[in-house]
Amino acid sequence: MNMQLVEHFNWGARTFVMGVLNITPDSFSGDGLVSEAETVERATEQARGFLAAGADILDIGGESTRPGSRLITAEEEVARVIPVVTAVATLPGAVVSIDSFKADVAAAALDAGAHIVNDVWGLRADPAMAALTAERGAPVILMHNRSRPNDVELDARLGGSYLGAVYDDLMVDICAEILQLVETAREAGVPDDQIIVDPGIGFGKTVTQNLAIINQIDRIKALGFPVLLGASRKSFIGRVLDVPVDQRLEGSAAASAIGILRGADIIRVHDVEAMTRIARMTDAILNAPADGGPTAK
């Protein structure tokens, strides 16, 4: 399905909220919907709740990207997500993104009514993905990712995390590598106004590197593309605050608020109602006139 980002989203006017719908039994965030007979009904109800709470995009994924997770086949992933995409895409006002790095899954999801492709490997994992997004006219989210499946640190309480990669200069390297992802998309025929970039919080970064990236999102914003920040409930928050995944709302809120301050256009979140309020409040503060506006009578 062809969707023009520039027509649907007025970038800079406010922060947009992406709600996460995990159709997985092993989501790191603990909110995955196991693929059972009632999954479609449960996912649709969750999507309705997200939309009512202010979500602008519903991100549907069928394969966990948590450190140490099991890889699944495209066929298994399609079986998990397509019934949900089909149902959710019919909801009034729903904009659906498919969270997958496999071209076969993305193609099936676009056929089922999805609008956006959210690729955690930035078109690098499947050689057919770039051409697919270009041919379909689908907007694409390109995520920076230096994670290595074998470099994982597991903690029974705080969850798993990828070990950090070595960067010569963290932000210079990440910006350069994001531009390489953009060039791949361009060469396939994806226009610039159909590209969103994501610094890939948690994917091949240490705790300190994740914090530094959030605090310097303005440098990624300066590349000239809308920026998505996905920090919600991630393990770096657990390690900073020493809390398990079900106690990371405040840390997620702080990360998102700073990200918005630094220029993030979209926040990808699990706690949609709370995070939408945080985004709206942060936007209101940032957009307030410096002189306080007219004096109330």
Image (cartoon, rainbow, N blue to C red):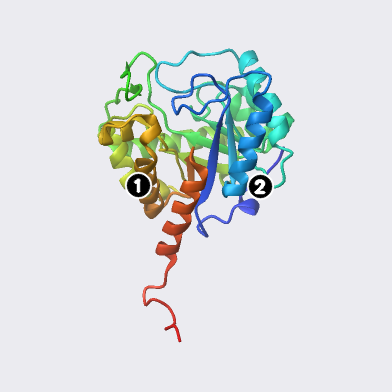
Kind of residue at badge 2: Gln
**In the image, residue 60 lies at what x, y percent?**
59, 31
Kind of residue at badge 1: Ala
Residue 243 falls left or right of residue 98: left
Q: Quadrant of residue 46?
A: top right
- Quick one: 18 or 100, which is closer to the camera? 18
**In the image, residue 235 lies at what x, y percent?**
34, 29
Q: Quadrant of residue 234?
A: top left
Q: Residue at x 35, y 47 (%)?
A: 254
Q: Earlier in the sequence, mark 2 or mark 1?
A: 2
Q: Nearer the viewer, mark 2 or mark 1?
A: 1
- Quick one: 77 or 270, which is closer to the camera? 270
* Label 1 packing within 10 angstroms: few (<14), some (14-19), many (20+): some
Is residue 107 something that shows in the picture? Answer: no
* Label 2 packing within 10 angstroms: few (<14), some (14-19), many (20+): some
Q: How many callouts does the rendering have?
A: 2
Compared to residue 53, the image places residue 34 above or below, namely above
The residue beneath circle 1 is 254
- Quick one: 170 or 79, which is closer to the camera? 79
Compared to residue 156, the image places residue 223 above or below, namely below
The residue beneath circle 2 is 4
Residue 284 falls left or right of residue 250: right
